[in-house]
Amino acid sequence: MYNITIIFSVHLDVDNHNSTELLNIIEKENPEIIFEEFDISRNEDEYYKNGHYKYQEQCSVETTAIMKYLEKYKVIHIPVDTYEVTYFPTEMYRKISLANEEYDKLFKENLVKSLQQGYSYINSIESNELFLKMHIIEEEVLKNLNDKLLSDEYEKWKWITNNRDKEMLNNIYNFSKKNKFNNAIFIIGAEHRISIFNKIKDFNKNEKLKINWKSWRIA
């Protein structure tokens, strides 16, 4: 049976959202396979290509925790985020925040709770509902602003996110078709939550290989 537990993260190693907490979660899950939202081939640094990217100063919390885990346990680590991305729309989100006070408040609330409460919050129903509210507000703000350039940028970013999520799931399914396992984890940014769950529903309908997906929740 193919079981994959999704662990959502926010990439920052700050306060209670840290690599030690994530490492403890991974150890309790005891996976045979670790799928990560990362692509080693994108980075030209030889440390990354040789699998030693734990030594880099700007490692994400996920990378740091996974490398610590691999020092202690022999498991297969598969970076699956291989879609080419050349930019992040920071200015777009700034404009949405400036245009809507509630959105700005929810964005900051989500970040503060993520860093203060760590993975128990990020992987909670509360966090999921907050992300849903933010996405609804984004659509409303763009409609009200009637800014074609901003709307085009938003749609472009949605398209990129959609393709990234499809590619990550494709990579996971392609690996799974060639390799049998019982217990794996998939660590991915929390901003992918809504999109990735929708894609999983589609994959479950269309793929012959059946994977039992579940979300990690703190006990």
Image (cartoon, grey):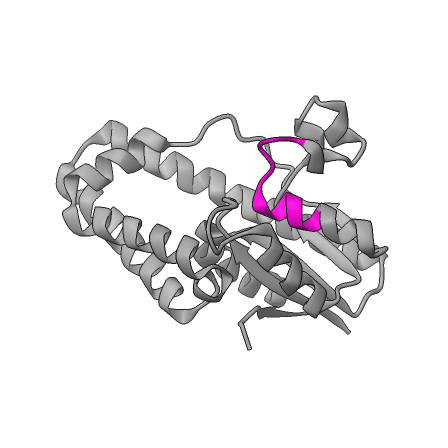
Image quarter in which the C terminus is found = bottom right
Q: The N terminus appears in which quarter of the rendering?
A: bottom right
- Which quadrant of the structure image shows residue 184? bottom right
Q: Would you identify the image quadrant in which residue 73 lies?
A: bottom right
Is 67 placed left or right of 193 in the picture?
right
Left/right placement of residue 39 relative to residue 138 reads right
Instruction: Return the residue found at the far top.
Output: 44
Q: Residue furthest bottom?
A: 219
Relative placement, left or right, of 211 versus 200 is right
Q: Is residue 129 magenta?
A: no
Residue drawn at (69%, 69%) of the image: 28
Task: Say which residue appears at 44% left-offset and 68% top-offset.
Answer: 124
Q: Position of residue 167 (x, y in %)?
A: 62, 45
Can you give x and y, in whole percent of width and height, for residue 217 in the image? 53, 72
- Up-down relation of residue 64 to residue 53 (above or below): below
Picture residue at 22% right of the left edge, 41% below the top: 97
In the picture, residue 41 is in which quadrant? top right
Please tell me which residue lies in front, 169 or 209. 169
How many tags in the picture? 0
User: Is residue 65 one of those drawn in magenta?
Assistant: yes
Residue 17 spot, x, y in % from top left: 50, 54
| Residue 151 visible in this rendered orientation of the protein | no
In this rendering, the answer to whether 54 lies above or below 128 is above
Give x and y (percent) for residue 9: 52, 53
Q: Which residues are magenta?
A: 56-66
- Residue 136, visible in the rendered structure: yes
Residue placed most toward the observer, 3 or 28: 28
